[in-house]
Image (cartoon, rainbow, N blue to C red):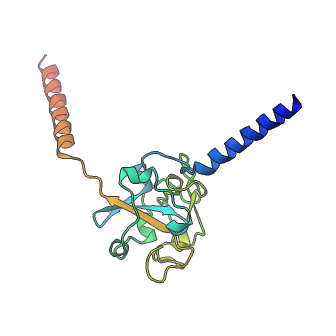
Amino acid sequence: METKTKKALIRALLVSAVISGNVQAAFINAPLPTNTYIVSNGLDWAWAFPLPASSGLDLSYQSTLGWRLPTLEELLLAPDATDFMFVGANVPLGGSDPVSGASFQAVNASLTGAAACATPYFSNSYRHCDWQDGQGQPFGPWAGLPGAAGFADQLVVRGAQIPEPGTLALLGLGIAGLMLSKRKSKAC
């Protein structure tokens, strides 16, 4: 009886190891909140990984939402690290994103406010971006650009999300309906 229990335990451990070894999803498999990326040159740009993509970037979920690696031509027009700083960005200065746990490491004096870091949406092992490894910082440029170090941070892109005409039409109808209902209530 003891041997059966040991065999069952070993089998359960092996199954668990196989399953956990094959499942390599990012910490967060959800659409990126708008405060985790920027729009520049007609593309959405996300600071997605503290190393080049070949070091473990996970696009399995985010690629279904249009995120991909930028081409060299796109990278040549890539934003600087300081472009990721804006009021309301997901990582407050000196802190971490309360939703994803994203933070900035390897900081310097040019990080002066909240900035956007999307690593937890693209990684199952990292939650940070390295500020000094972004374009325009001491150890830039971005991964994929000529002269990038082996530890350069990775950007991802997608076509800028512009509402479809049908969505805009529905929004217009909704606003017109609200205005009409207000007009009716004032008349009564």
Residue 65: image location, x then y, percent: 37, 50
Q: What residue occupies the far bottom of the structure in this picture?
A: 147
Residue at position x 41%, y 67% in the image: 83
In the picture shown, does residue 94 fall above or below 178? below
Question: Disc count in the image?
Answer: 0
- The residue under the point 42% across, 47% down is 31
Quadrant of res 175? top left
Residue in front for this viewpoint, 16 or 57:
16
At which x and y percent is residue 57? Answer: 51, 61
Q: Image check: 14 left or right of 53?
A: right
Front in this rendered view, residue 5 or 164: 5
Quadrant showing the C terminus? top left
**Height in image: 143 above or below 18?**
below
Q: Quadrant of the N terminus?
A: top right
- Say whether residue 109 is visible: no
Asked whether, in this view, residue 181 is left or right of residue 105, the answer is: left
Q: Position of residue 42 (x, y in %)?
A: 28, 63
Q: Residue at x 57, y 60 (%)?
A: 128
Q: Residue furthest top?
A: 188
Q: Which residue sits furthest left? A: 187
Question: Residue 72, can we see it?
Answer: yes
Image quarter for residue 7?
A: top right
Q: Nearer the viewer, residue 179 or 100?
A: 100
Classify residue 4 as left or right of residue 23.
right
